[in-house]
Image (spheres, rainbow, N blue to C red):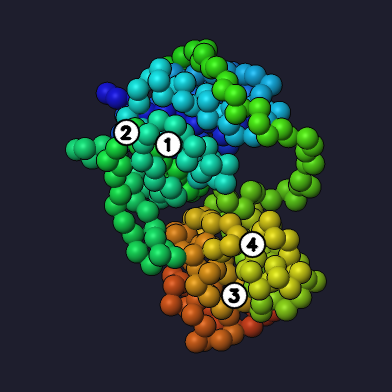
């Protein structure tokens, strides 16, 4: 069976959930070979093996932390040359898509971004994408070179599938461009204790109907009762009610959780583009004609200032 390269997104050896999802998808089309780079790369092996990696290629160098994405592209290019994979899978984050695009250009291959599913085909992997603001689904296949595919978080369930996970050193030679852009400083983002927005299984978002920054406490309370991330529409972000880092939509972040709750959000196409692939969508809005209701699985026509606190109380009661 052909091997499939999976780029490992980790923090000092702690593997992030989207990578484990990629291993699930990789097993559909071949044998997963993980590529872990930077500090703690070798520490990823146990988690990767538990979820199906037959091999783990590792390489640590200061360049991965000190410079931007080019060193990682150099390493993936070396891995492609060594393995000759059936495909290369990368998490569909902002950095992941840049790495994938640069890699595809380097190796002369086609690229598919923001896939939401993956299956084996007679002529190579076939990816499912949501296009035109998620109004259509397409089946796409790369017809030139080794397919490079980025996959959106929450596109597959994490499944344990113990494999050998043999750790092997990857030989990497950095090119002249690897040190072209240096990281001069880092500022840790203040932790809220909530899941990362793009990786969360549940997202609760607020929009213009929240009617003020102080009222986002209602959205946060509901999110905390569900163990969810907090999102916001562009209208709420532009009004200064919530940080831009939490914006969901075409000009913000794209999310695909198992459950998305939209409170006081009308459902403009720009917002829908960022959340329409959510598995189950619930909307709370006092306007029964709001476009968001054309999209939802469950809709509540009512004032969010009545509905959201009642919902939060009910969830906490049942949990208690």
Q: Residue at x 64, y 49 (%)?
A: 195
Question: Which of the image's four quarters has the C terminus?
Answer: bottom right
Which residue is situated farthest in the front direction here? 176
Q: Residue at x 49, y 26 (%)?
A: 76
Which label's residue is closer to the chain start, 3 or 4?
A: 4
The percent coordinates of residue 112 (x first, y second) are 39, 45
- Does the image show residue 5? yes
Secondary structure beneath dot 1 equals helix
Graded by Cα atoms within 10 Å as few (under 14), some (14 to 19) or many (20 or more), the crowding at tag 4 reads many
Q: Residue at x 57, y 46 (%)?
A: 94
| Residue identified by numbered label 3 | 265
User: Rounded to the nearest whole Å, what is the CA distance between mark 4 and mark 1?
Assistant: 29 Å
In the rendered image, the vertical position of residue 299 relative to residue 201, given as above or below: below
Q: Is residue 25 left or right of residue 231?
A: left
Q: Between tags 2 and 3, which lies in front?
A: 2
Mark 1 vs 2: CB contact within 8 A:
yes
Q: What mark, if any, has residue 145 been given in the picture? A: 2
User: Rounded to the nearest whole Å, what is the CA distance between mark 1 and mark 2?
Assistant: 9 Å
The percent coordinates of residue 34 (x first, y second) are 47, 25
Mark 3 vs 1: CB contact within 8 A:
no
Which label's residue is closer to the chain start, 2 or 3?
A: 2
Q: What mark, if any, has residue 104 been given in the picture? A: 1
């Amino acid at each position: 069976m052909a091997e499939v390269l999976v780029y490992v997104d980790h923090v000092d050896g702690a593997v992030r959930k989207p990578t484990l999802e990629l291993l699930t998808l990789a097993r559909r089309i071949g044998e997963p070979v993980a590529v872990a780079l930077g500090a703690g790369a070798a520490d990823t092996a146990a988690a990767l093996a538990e979820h199906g990696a037959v091999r783990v290629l590792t390489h640590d160098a200061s360049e991965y932390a000190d410079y931007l994405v080019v060193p990682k592209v150099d390493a993936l290019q070396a891995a492609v040359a060594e393995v000759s994979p059936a495909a290369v899978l990368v998490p569909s984050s902002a950095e992941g898509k840049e790495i994938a695009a640069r890699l595809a250009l380097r190796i002369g291959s086609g690229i598919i971004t923001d896939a939401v599913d993956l299956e084996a085909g007679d002529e190579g992997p076939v990816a499912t994408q949501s296009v035109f603001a998620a109004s259509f689904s397409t089946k796409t296949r790369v017809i030139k070179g080794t397919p490079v595919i980025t996959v959106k978080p929450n596109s597959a369930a994490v499944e344990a599938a113990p494999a050998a996970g043999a750790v092997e050193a990857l030989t990497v030679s950095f090119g002249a461009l690897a040190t072209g852009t240096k990281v001069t400083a880092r500022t840790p983002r203040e932790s809220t204790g909530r899941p990362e927005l793009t990786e969360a299984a549940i997202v609760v978002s607020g929009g213009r109907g929240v009617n003020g920054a102080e009222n986002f406490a209602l959205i946060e309370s509901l999110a905390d009762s569900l163990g969810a991330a907090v999102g916001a529409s562009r209208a709420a972000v532009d009004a200064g009610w919530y940080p831009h880092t939490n914006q969901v939509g075409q000009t913000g972040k794209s999310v695909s959780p198992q459950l998305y709750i939209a409170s006081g959000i009308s459902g403009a196409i720009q917002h829908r583009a960022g959340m329409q692939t959510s598995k189950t969508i619930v909307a709370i809005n006092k306007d029964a004609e709001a476009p968001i209701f054309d999209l939802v699985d469950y809709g509540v026509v009512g004032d969010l200032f009545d509905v959201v606190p009642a919902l939060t109380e009910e969830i906490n009661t049942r949990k208690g």
